[in-house]
Amino acid sequence: MFTRRSLALATLALAAVPAFAQQAAWPTKPIRIVVTFTPGGAPDTLARILAEKWASLGQPVTVDNKPGAGGNIGADFVAKSAPDGHTLVVGTVGTHAINASLYTNMPYHPLKDFTPVIFLASTPNLLVVNNHVPAKTTSELIALAKKEPLTFGSSGSGTSIHLSGELFNTMAGVKMQHIPYKGRAAAIPDLLGGRITMIFDNMPSALPLVKSGELRAIAVTSAQRSPAAPNIPTLAESGLPGFDASSWFALFAPAGLPRDIQLKINAETARVLAMPDVKEKLATLGLDAAPGTPEQLGTFVQSEMTKWAKVVKESGAKAD
């Protein structure tokens, strides 16, 4: 995962770029940032922050939500767009790491069909249950899952929300049923109404519902507790040692993006993520911003593809 040290190294790397590369003619027309899920989630939040702050660049910036097929529809749209820096996608662990192993017929390749631009942020998933579920801890939930049929919702097959549940099944030795939705916004009403048992939702989306008392938090999926919710234990410390499944979000352009424009977008994004008001907002939401170089992002995506391919194989997960 990207760290603050990565940010420092990226800053030094960008400082060494020749002046002519920093003066790339971008943007020269309206910018479209594609989000591969419905409004309201972490990738949508990040895209809208960029759209707001990039308004100073002198061109309109719109956020285009294109949900479906675990994010593949929106990602494929960008992969097939002109590589001029004016159509970008907020890629996720699903679209750029998990789906390549989960879907039989992928319309794009996560690395070959994209230009990596910059890592945006990561966040734990938060395991939450509706308030009618008697289990209040990880061990109690596992015991319940071994006695009764339980279900977990997701924002679609291939998302980290889905694979967090599959990893839970494998490590806990249970068989909870996966119920995919077209975005997490569609799953939450069913969770609140008790039609599904739980969801491994992104922290920014789930935490407000926990704070309001509408849902109950069981644990976070990251290896360490989240600074945004330090009182909520990790799955690793509360019954499933070694459990680690975080969501991450990064900016990608179509393959063939000129190097100077790639670096210009990287620099403009890093500038936004370093703004005090942006840093404060992301921290409140449980998003850990850690931008780096395009090369670091490309290496990271490759390692994540390898990691999640193993999880998919071991869990037997399939795109529903």
Image (tube, grey):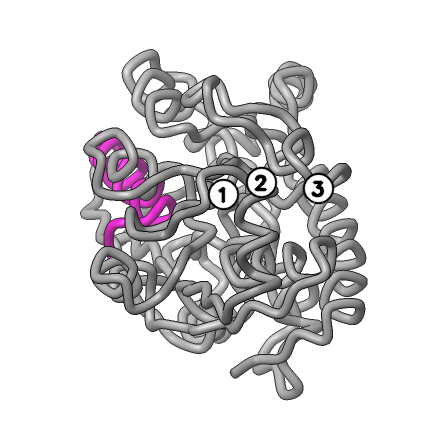
The total number of labels drawn is: 3
Residue found at the very far front of the displayed protein: 147
Residue count near mark 2 (Cα–Cα under 10 Å), binned few <14, some 14–19, many ≥20? many
- Give the foreground label among 3 and 2: 3
Q: Which residue is mark 1?
A: 125
Q: Which residue is mark 2?
A: 221
Q: Which mark is residue 270?
A: none
In 3D space, how far apart are the residues under numbered discs 3 and 1 (Cα atoms)?
15 Å
Q: Secondary structure at mark 2?
A: loop
Query: Residue 295, relative to residue 316: is it above or below?
Result: above
Residue 87 figure quarter: bottom left
Q: Amino acid at mark 2?
A: Thr
Camera-side residue: 297 or 190?
190
Q: Which residue is mark 3?
A: 240
Q: Residue at x 62, y 69 (%)?
A: 175
Q: Amino acid at mark 3?
A: Leu
Q: Residue at x 71, y 41 (%)?
A: 240
Do the residues bearing badges 3 and 2 touch, measured as CB atoms within 8 Å?
no
Residue range corresponding to the magenta coloring: 39-57
For residue 233, side relative to residue 132 (left or right):
right
For residue 34, side relative to residue 247 (left or right):
left
Query: Residue 298, relative to residue 68: is it above or below?
Result: above
Q: Position of residue 80 (x, y in %)?
A: 49, 75
Residue count near mark 3 (Cα–Cα under 10 Å), binned few <14, some 14–19, many ≥20? some
Camera-side residue: 142 or 189?
142
Q: Can residue 205 be found in the magenta stretch?
A: no
Q: Secondary structure at mark 3?
A: loop
